[in-house]
Amino acid sequence: MRAGEAEERDRKIVEFCGYVESRRRAMYWYALFVKTGNEENIARLISSVWRIKNLNPFIPLYDALFKKRGEYLPEKKLCIPGYVFIESNVRGTKFYHSIRPFINKSQRLFIKVLRNDNENTNQSFEMNEQEQNFLEGLMNSERCIELSKGVFVGDSVVVTDGPLVGHEGYIKKVKRHRVEAVLEFEILGSKREVTVGLAVLQRLPANSEVSIGVK
């Protein structure tokens, strides 16, 4: 690659990264604690029925596998049952006041709007940037966490492919027969468990070398 082409490539990368960062800072994430089983209904109400301006609901999913007649088949499941997330350019109490009337009308579906336990004020509802970026980084453009693959090296799991690469420290437990892992990390200042897909392909002796990026 010529020097001029390399400089142009680097300039475009910097511009794109700046665009992504500015977009993330301009959009805030919120979480609604709802009655389990009503997640999709509430997301539909917000986006299609109530049509609340500047509020874009989504439900984090993960790629899962279920066994049927000896064969593993793909499906999508909820990462955090009982939660509906909202992306919005409306911040803090303005967000709360924009959605509160609708929550009051449908109390049989909602439990509460979560507040950020790490903030000094009880008026903070949005996720902080670190929490948001971490969760967003796990998901694809369809708000789904794709299946990761890994191996056991001794008693430790090493992720070799997928969004969990490098995030082994967040894995609280591995459900090998269910092809799942339970992560634990902070959302709105409190530790919460998030289920994702993880296929552990084999168990290796301790101190074995493992190649990252192996399908």
Image (tube, rainbow, N blue to C red):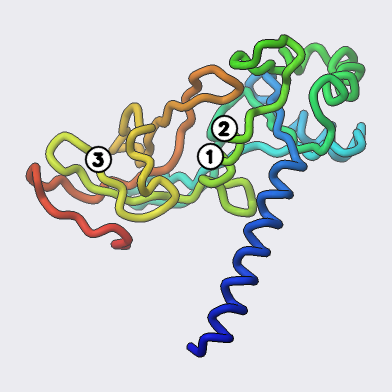
Residues packed near mark 2 inside 10 Å, few (<14), some (14 to 19) or many (20 plus): some
Residue at mark 1: 134
**Residue type at mark 3?**
Val
Residue at mark 2: 131
Q: Nearer the viewer, residue 189 or 98?
A: 189
CB under 8 Å between discs 1 and 2: yes
Q: Marks 1 and 2, how far apart in space?
A: 5 Å
Percent across and percent down for residue 109 are: 76, 17
Residue at mark 3: 157
Residue at the image point whose x is 92% and y is 37% from the top = 53
Q: Marks 2 and 3, how far apart in space?
A: 23 Å
CB under 8 Å between discs 2 and 3: no
For marks 3 and 1, the one nearer the N-term is 1
Q: Marks 3 and 1, how far apart in space?
A: 20 Å
- Left or right side of 93 for 40: left
For marks 2 and 3, the one nearer the N-term is 2
Q: Nearer the viewer, residue 90 or 51?
A: 90
Compared with residue 158, is residue 111 higher up or lower down, i.e. above or below? above
